[in-house]
Image (cartoon, rainbow, N blue to C red):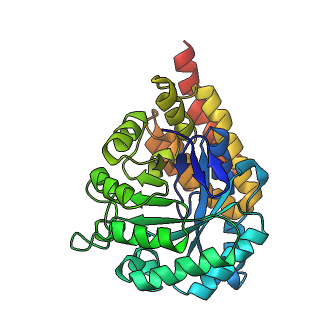
Amino acid sequence: MKPIQIGPVTLADPVILAPMSGVTDLPFRLLVKRGGAGLVVSEMIASAAMVHANHKTMKMASKCAGERPIAVQLAGCDPALVAQAAKMNEDRGADIIDINMGCPVKKVTNGQHAGSALMRDVGQAAKILEAAVRAVALPVTLKMRTGWDDGSRNAPELARVAESCGIKMITVHGRTRCQFYRGRADWAFIRKVKQAVRIPVIGNGDVSGPEDARALLDVSGADGVMIGRAACGRPWLLGHVIQALKTGRTPQPPPLEDQLALVLEHFESMLVHHGTDRGVRIARKHLGWYSKGLPGAAEFRSRVNRTADPNAVRELLRAFYDPAIERLAA
C-alpha cells in the first residue's frame, strides 16, 4: 500500500474511515483520526437539507482542523442541489467532497432516488457527478457498490463514467444494493473496477482487522482500504491496521485503563457536540460497542440504555471498567 493522490490531497496512508449515518459524527471522527487513520469521512449528508440549512444537517456537517483533510459525503438526486451543497461545504472548509451512490437504505433509494439507486441510472449519476465537479475547486470522489443486484453489477461502467466526469477517487463496497450487508463482500469484483480506471480505487466491506485488510488489497488490487462497522467501539483500529501493514506486526488493543479514559473523553465530547440530552442518547450505542466482549457487558448496556443522567452514566462506566482493570492488574 502506497500513498495516493486525490487531486491536490496526498493520503500517505490510505486506510479510511467509512461514512456511517448516526456514527461518524465529529467526536468519533476526531478520535479515529487521532488514532492514526489516513482519512475520516463525515456522515452522509442530504444535499437538499444542507441547502435548506436544516439545523440537524448543519450539525452533521460540523468539522474542525483536527480531522484534516476534511472529507464531507453528500447524497442527492438533483444535480443542482448536490452542486450547491458541495459549494457550501467548500466554503465551510472541506478539502474533499464525496458523492454517495452506495447507500442501500430504502428511505434513500426509494424515497429520494439517491444513494445506490443511482447505479440504476448511469445517465443521471453522470449529471450529478459533473455538476459537483464543476461547482468546486476541491477534488470530488465517489462511493458506490458493485451494482443494484446480481444481474446488474455495473460498477466498472459507472467507474469509467465517473473518471470521465472528473472524479478523483472511487470507493467500492463489495456488495450489491440488494445484499445490503448480508453475505460476503466480493473483493475480487473490486479488481474489475480497479482495472477499468486510472484513478485510485479503495476497497470496502468485511474488513475487521489487519489480516482482512491485507487480503482485500491482495485480492482486489485496490489502492487502499475503507473500514466501517469494525471501527465502532475501536477508534484505534485504523491506526493499528496501518501499523500492521507497514511493519507486519499487529499492535495490541490499548490497556483497559486507557480505553476507559478514551471512552470518558468520547462521552464528554458527545455531550458538548450534541447537547446533554441528545448526547446521552447518542452515546448509548457507542458505549455498547466499547463494552463488547467484557465481563458483564449485557447488564451494563441494559442499565446505560435506561439512564438519562450523565453523572449516572459516568458512575456506570467506572463501575463497569474498574473491576476489569483490577482483575488484569492482579
Image location of residue 239, percent across then percent down: 57, 36
Image location of residue 63, percent across then percent down: 73, 59
Q: Check the image and report above or below for 65 versus 75.
A: above
Q: Residue at x 41, y 42 (%)?
A: 208
In the picture, measured across the screen, residue 66 lies left or right of residue 38, that is right
Q: Residue at x 33, y 53 (%)?
A: 191
Q: Check the image and report above or below for 22 versus 243.
A: below
Of all residues, the one furthest to the top in this rendering is 330
Number of numbered callouts drawn: 0
Q: Residue at x 41, y 40 (%)?
A: 213
Nearer-the-camera pick, 213 or 285: 213
Image location of residue 225, percent across then percent down: 46, 47
Of all residues, the one furthest to the left in this rendering is 151
Q: Check the image and report above or below for 117 versus 72.
A: below
Whether residue 310 appears in this view of the structure is yes
Image location of residue 215, percent across then percent down: 34, 39
